Amino acid sequence: MRISSIYKIKNGLGKFVAYTILIFVALACIFPLFWMFGSALKTQSTVFSDFSLFPKHMHWENFTIAWTKAHFGMYFFNSVLYTVITVGGLVFFSTMAAFAFSRLDFPFKNALFLMFVCMMMIPLPGQFVALYVLLTKLHLVNTRIGYILPQIDAGQALAIFILKTFFDNIPRDLEDSARIDGCNKWGIYWHLAFPLAKPAIAVVIIFNCLAVWNEYLLAMLVFSDKSLMPLPRGLMVFQGTHMTEYALLMAGVSITVIPIILVYLVMQKYIISGITAGALKG
Amino acid sequence: MENRIFRFLSIVVCAVIFFSPTSGCVSKSSQKDSKPALVIWHWMSDREDTLQQIAQQYETETGVKVEFQLFAPSEAYGNKVRASAQTDTLPDIYGILAETRDYASFIKAGFVEDLTPYMEANNALWKKQFFKKALSMDTFVKDNQFDVLPGIYGVPIDVTNIQFLYNKDLFAKAGLDTNKPPRTFEQFKAVAKKLKENNIQGLVSGWGEIWMINCLADNFAWNIMGQDKILATIKGEVPYTDPDWIKVFSLFDEMGKSGLLASGMITMVNKHAEQTFANQRAALAFNGSWCVNVYKGMNPDLNYGVFLPPKISDKYPVVVWGGAGSSFKVNAKSKHKEAAIKFLKWITEKKQQIFLSKETHNLPSNRNALSNLSPHLKQFASAMKNTVHPSQLPNSEYPRVIETMGKGIQLIIIGQQTPEELAQKMQKIKEQEMKRSEKYNKK
C-alpha cells in the first residue's frame, strides 16, 4: 500500500516535471508565431512602441494591404506550382533511386551511394556560380524548369538517404512473396516498396515542402522576370535596404506560413513513424 | 490507393514535361516580343516603386522602354551579378556591391564602361552637376593600386554621409540646450555626464557592424592627422604605433569610460540602434543620412537634430564619412551602351533627382537638386563638402588591418585592450600583410 502511494507520488511528480518542461518548450515554440501574428496587427510605429502581444487597436487591413501590395496572388500560385512539382518529382525519382540502391545489384553501387551522401554536405548556395553557368548554357535561365530541376537535384541526396535506410529494413521475405505472385522488379517497387514507404515519403515531403516553399536565393539567381518568382520575393517588398515595414512584413509572413502549417497538420501522423522507422535506423 | 498514387505521380510527371518546354518558350518568346530597350538590375527594394515610376516617365518622354529588375537582399544581388559576369549575361546597367578590389576586377574584365569622356564632354557639364565627392567612389585615380586605367566608372543616383544625431526632447529633459549640440570632444563628454546624471542612455549606433566603428575612427583620424599622414600610414611609411593613431584609439577608450555609450553598444546592429533612437530610449545616435527615412517610418514625431562629429584638433578640418550612396555602372559589352548612358544622364538631371529625393528621402547626387529637401536632409546635405571616404585615396588599407582596427576598438570600449596594444597589433598585421603582398608581387 505504502509502496504504491510512493510510486504514485513519484509517478505524478515525474509527470508534473515532464509536462511543465514540455509546456515551456511548447510556449517557446509557439511564442514567435503569436508575436508574428500580433505584430501583423500593429502599425509601423506601434511595432516599436507597443510591446503587448496583441495590440488594443488591431489593424486587420494589414493583411489585405500585404496581399495586394506584394502581388501575393501571383507569387502564391508560383510557389504552389514549384512546391508541388519539385516535391512530386523528388519523391518520384528519389524513391526509385533509393529502391535501386537498396535492392538492386549493379557496379559501383556503394561508391555511387557515397557520392550521393557527400552531396548532402554541399549546400545549394555553394554551387550557385557553376549552376548558373550550366543553366545559361542549357538556355534554362529565367524559365520555370530551370528553377525546378536544380531543386529536385538538391533534395535528392537526403531523400535517397532516408528512403534507402527505410527500404533496407523491409524484410526480404516480402519481396520473395511478391516475386512468387508474379511481380518483376518494377512491380516490387510499385506494389510493395512504395506503399510501405509512406511514412518515410511523408518525411521527405515535409522536409522538402518547407525547403522549396521558403527557397529564395536560387530564385533570385535563375529568374529575372518578376512574374516567375516565388512567394519570398513578395516579402522583399517590405524589406528595404535601410527600412523595413515590419507590420506588413509580419502580415505577409503570416500568410505564407499557412500552407506549410497545413502540410504539417496533414502529414503529422506520419512524421514520428517516418523519422524513427526510416531516417534514424541504419 | 495504388490508383490514386499512380494518378498523382502521372500528373506530376506530365506537369514537369508540360512545363519544361512551355515555360522556356513562353519566357523566350515574351522576351522577343516585348524585350525592353534597357534592362537595369538593382537591389534597392525600398525604392522599387519610385524607380518603376521613373522608368515609366522616361518611356513617356523618350519612347525608350526601361525595365528595372529588383534582386534583393544585397547578398542575393551580389551572387546574381557575379554569376552573370561569369556567363557574360550582365544587363545594360547594374550596380556592384563589393569592395574596391572586386569593383576593379569587374572593370579589368571589361564589364564596366569608362564614363570619363561622357562626363568631361561639353566642358564637363555632366560631371559638374554632382557633389564633388559623389564621384569619388566611382573614380580610379592615376597610379591606383588596382592597376585600373584612371577614369570615372559609375554614376551615383544619390549620396550619403554619416553624422551624429541628438534627440531634442531628451536633451531638454537632461537640462541641455536643444539648439547647441556638442561641437568639441570635451563638450561631448560633458553631454554624456549630464545624460548619465539624468539616467538617459547616451550614444547608440551599429557598432556591432564593424564598418560603422571604423567610420568614426576615420573621422577622428582625418581631423587629428589629415589625409597625407593617413595615406602615409597606408603606404607603410608611418606606423600605427604613431602617437596620433594612439590618440584616435584613446578617444574610444574615453567614450567607453565616460558612460557615453549605450549598453550593448559593441554588439549592436544598426537596425536595433535605429529602433532605440526612434523610440527615444537613447539621446544620441551615429547614423547615415538614410536614417531620415527610417526614423520617419518608425516615429514620425521624433524631434531630433543633426550635428558633425566633435572636433578633436584644430589642425585639420572636421570631416564626415560619405560619398556616393547607390551608383550604377554601364555594361561595356552592352548593345545598348549609348542608350544606357543617355538614361543615366537623364536620371541624374535636376528634375528627376528632386523627384527621387522627395519620394525616397535620400540625398540627391545632383547638387542643384536640394531645393525641396526636408530640414534634416538639408543638414546632411550641408555636410557633403566635408565628406571623405577611404576609397577616394589612391591606396587602400589591407582588409585584415581594417578588421583588426574595428575589432580592437570594440575591445578597447569594453576595457579588454588598451589603445597602445591595439596600435601594436595593427602594426604587426600591417607588416605581415605588406610582406605577403611583396612576395606575391615578386611571383
Image: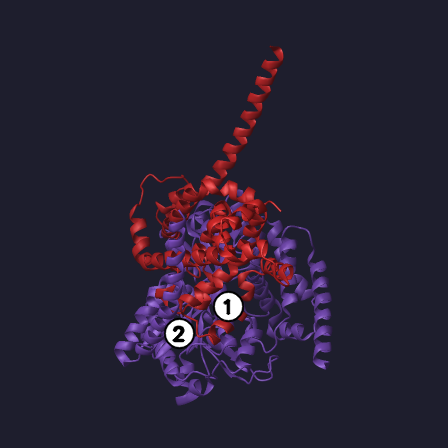
Chain colours: A red, B purple
Q: Dot 2: what SS?
A: strand
A268 lies left or right of B268: left
Residue for badge 2:
B40
B99 or B387, which is in the foreground? B99
List x then y, in percent, for residue B135. Answer: 47, 77
Query: Which comes sooner in the sequence, label 1 or label 2?
Result: 2
Q: Quadrant of residue A222?
A: bottom left
Q: How far from the left and from the top, in percent, is residue B322?
A: 50, 68
Q: CA distance from mark 1 to mark 2?
A: 16 Å
**The N terminus of chain A sits in image quarter:** top right
Q: Secondary structure at mark 1?
A: helix
Q: Which is closer to the viewer, label 1 or label 2?
A: 1
Could you say which disc has been placed on residue B443 in the image? none
Q: Nearer the viewer, residue A53 or B268?
A: A53
Q: Is residue A98 above or below residue B386?
A: above
Residue that sits furthest to the left in the current view: B60
Residue A18 versus residue B420 in the image, above or below: above
Tell me, for residue B79, which label it has, or none: 1
Same chain for labels 1 and 2? Say yes or no: yes
